[in-house]
Image (cartoon, helix red, strand yellow):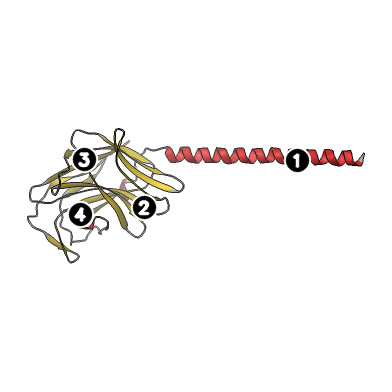
Amino acid sequence: MKNVVDKSLKLLVFNRMKSLLHLFVGAVAVFVLVQSAQAQQTGGKPDRAAIEVLPFAREFMNEKFKTNDREVPDELRATTTDKIRIYGKRKLNRTAPVRGRLSAHFGKIVLVPVGNLKGVINVKSPSADDVTYYYASIELEGGKLDTKIIQLSTGVDYAWSVVKGPAQTTFKITDGAKEVVSLSGPAASVKSVGFASTVRYLGNEADISVTFE
């Protein structure tokens, strides 16, 4: 009789433990799904006051200059009202020394605090080699930039998105199904994403608009 009771108790405990395990696994699965869904949700607008407009040089495209850094010539304008716009014509008719190195491609970069964001990019002045360049960038800890030159054409609405997951942040620009650029880094290290443009010769033009959805 004692053996039967012992077996019944053991079976009851086993079934209880099995049920608790199933509940735990189910809770973990729900948590993972929620986190994944949150990571995939994009949209909204960043805090405008936290957006930075900084001088930018192609020769130092992985360096973040300070707002008042006078080494980089003041070329192009940038506005951050209802959208980001970098535009203007080159005024300087010469190269200039920047950190002891002759440089020629100057403009602006706009850094947007990281969040789950998306929108559209279009240009009125297309990319042109050694004339007008456009860039996508992510800012990492320590003020370092990971920057890539991107080729943009007029008459095209490019989609852009930032997805901040639990482990990694990814910044993408696409032209339909075609990927224009993808930049990513550890979520804890990526501080902002950037849009930039430079021009080379007197009279060269740039004009890029970035909207938020």
User: Marks 2 and 4: which is nearer the front?
Assistant: 4
> Alpha carbon of mark 3 to alpha carbon of mark 1: how far?
63 Å
Residue appearing at x 51%, y 38% in the figure: 34
Q: Earlier in the sequence, mark 3 or mark 1?
A: 1
Distance, label 1 to label 4, CA atoms, is: 66 Å
Tell me if 117 is positioned left or right of 82 in this view: right
Image spot of residue 63 (x, y percent) = 27, 58
What's the residue type where badge 3 is placed?
Answer: Leu
Q: Position of residue 193 (x, y in %)?
A: 32, 48
Q: Are marks 3 and 4 in contact (CB under 8 Å)?
A: no
Residue tagged by mark 1? Answer: 14
Measuring 91% from the left and 41% from the top, which residue is drawn there? 2
Q: Which residue type carries mark 2? A: Lys
- According to the image, label 3 marks what residue? 152
Q: Which mark is residue 58?
A: 4
Q: Secondary structure at mark 3?
A: loop
Report which residue position mark 2 lands on: 191
Image position of 94 with respect to 116: above or below: below
